[in-house]
Image (tube, rainbow, N blue to C red):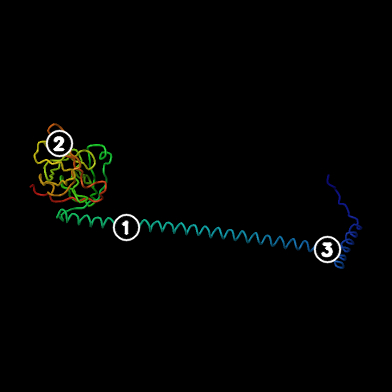
Amino acid sequence: MARSTPTNTPIRNYAIGFFLSSLLLFSDISYGTFNPLRGFVNASTLYVHIISKDIFANIITTFSSFQKNRSLLQENKELNEKILQIRAKDFINRKDNEEKFEIIDFYKSDLSLLKNNNVDIFKIASIDLRNYFCCSTHRIFLQNNNNVSADKNVPVFAGESFVGQTKAKYLNFIEVILFSDTSHVLPIKSNFFYCDARGKGKPMLISCKLNKNNQDFKNQIGDAVYTSGLGGVFLKDIEIGFISSIASFSVNEIEVLITLKANPLEETFYGIMNEETDEI
């Protein structure tokens, strides 16, 4: 319960306090009684100041290092991106240069083998591998970004030989039927026979059926096979493959198997002759 009237402090208490304070002050001034305590307090203050300064300096140093590392990481990231861009650009340039040289070599091959400079060059877009390895339909598609006019049944050249002929044109693509397609027929000849070779439906293989009683027949495995020029589509005397096997097909027939010279899986560029040859 609060007091309702103030309490007076006796004057002797003030006198005692004044006397003790004076005594302590005199003792400190005369004899340095509180010097150790004062030194301890000052040392403690200094120690705390030094520690605080070191901690603050370490915080600043750590933050500065963090900022510097962050800047270095950002610069490293930017440099890596620039290096990747330079590498990608260099790769594209090298591929472009390689393709240019391939086109030049390809064009030289056309001129020397076909003796015809009226050839358009196209890059392969796709090949139906599923059918190519298992079935009868063997087709490739060429890029036609410049929308070059390409007629049907025009010879297609690659890898120093003919590989097939044009079949159709869709948007910016040209469909090519390969010799190995079972629906394709190619007039060919060797040193001892002429025939219309049909695709076997197997990669790089065509075949001819010949009469066993043919007096000109000789078992010449490895002989080169050429286009005969009959039919007016393909130039004659262009080597398209070699005889790889000869076997009996029926009582009166033998089958001559021919392995083609050009492998469409290894070719990048194809030439299309834009003028058909005259029938021979």
- Local SS, label 1: helix
Mark 3 residue element:
loop
Amino acid type of disc 3?
A: Phe
Which of label 1 and label 2 is nearer to you?
A: 2
Disc 2 marks a residue whose amino acid type is Ile
Instruction: First in sequence, mark 3 or 1: give its number.
Output: 3
Instruction: Look at mark 2 in the image and give the residue it sits on.
Output: 254
Residue 201 located left or right of residue 234:
right
Residue located farthest toward the bottom when viewing the structure as drawn: 30
Q: Residue at x 90, y 57 (%)?
A: 13
Frontmost of labels 3 and 2 is: 2
What residue do we see at 13% from left, 34% from top? 253
Which residue, as the protein is rendered here, is positioned at the far left?
280
Q: Which residue is mark 3?
A: 34
Closer to the camera, 182 or 33?
Answer: 182
Task: Check disc 1: other Cα within 10 Å, few if <14, some if 14-19, many if 20+.
Answer: few
